[in-house]
Amino acid sequence: MNWDGIEGNWHQFKNHVKQQWSMLTDDHLDKIAGRREHLVGKIQENYGVAEHEAECQVMDWENSHQDIFAETAAEVRKHNVGLKGQQACKAANVIRTHLKNTTPTSNRR
């Protein structure tokens, strides 16, 4: 399914979005109205992240819901984000994983 289909059936997808981004209110979801670029913008605005990070989050979410978004995720990777965007998302994920797994060391004398 592509985002045109999601926009037309937004009421069915709002709960999936709300589960992932709980800071988005029902009013935000109504304003998003199934438009991907609006979802990216609201994530950016409400979570205080850069546009590329919000884009990565949406791509990750699409990939984790492949039954719904398989076609959309492929199209986004191919047309909107491009190779550089994909590499940036992968690099950001590697850094996040590294930071989560790194424990601060105590000051040694």
Image (tube, rainbow, N blue to C red):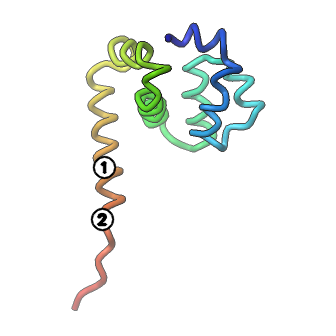
Q: Which amino acid type is marked by label 2? A: Thr
Tell me which residue sits at (77%, 30%) in the image.
Answer: 27
Residue 84 quadrant: top left
Query: Farthest left residue?
Result: 109
Q: Which amino acid type is marked by label 1? A: Ile
Tell me which residue sits at (67%, 18%) in the image.
Answer: 10
Tell me the residue that label 1 is attached to. Answer: 95
**Could you tell which of marks 1 and 2 lies nearer the N-terminus?**
1
Q: Position of residue 1 (x, y in %)?
A: 50, 11
Tell me which residue sits at (47%, 32%) in the image.
Answer: 61
Residue 42 quadrant: top right
Q: Position of residue 21 (x, y in %)?
A: 60, 40
Q: Calculate the distance from the C-alpha at mark 1 to the C-alpha at mark 2.
A: 10 Å
Asked if residue 13 lies left or right of residue 52, the reply is: right
Compared with 108, 95 (above or below) is: above
Tell me the residue that label 2 is attached to. Answer: 102
Q: Callout 1 environment at 10 Å: few (<14), some (14 to 19), or many (20+)?
A: few
Q: Quadrant of the C terminus?
A: bottom left
Tell me which residue sits at (58%, 9%) in the image.
Answer: 5
Compared with 43, 104 (above or below) is: below
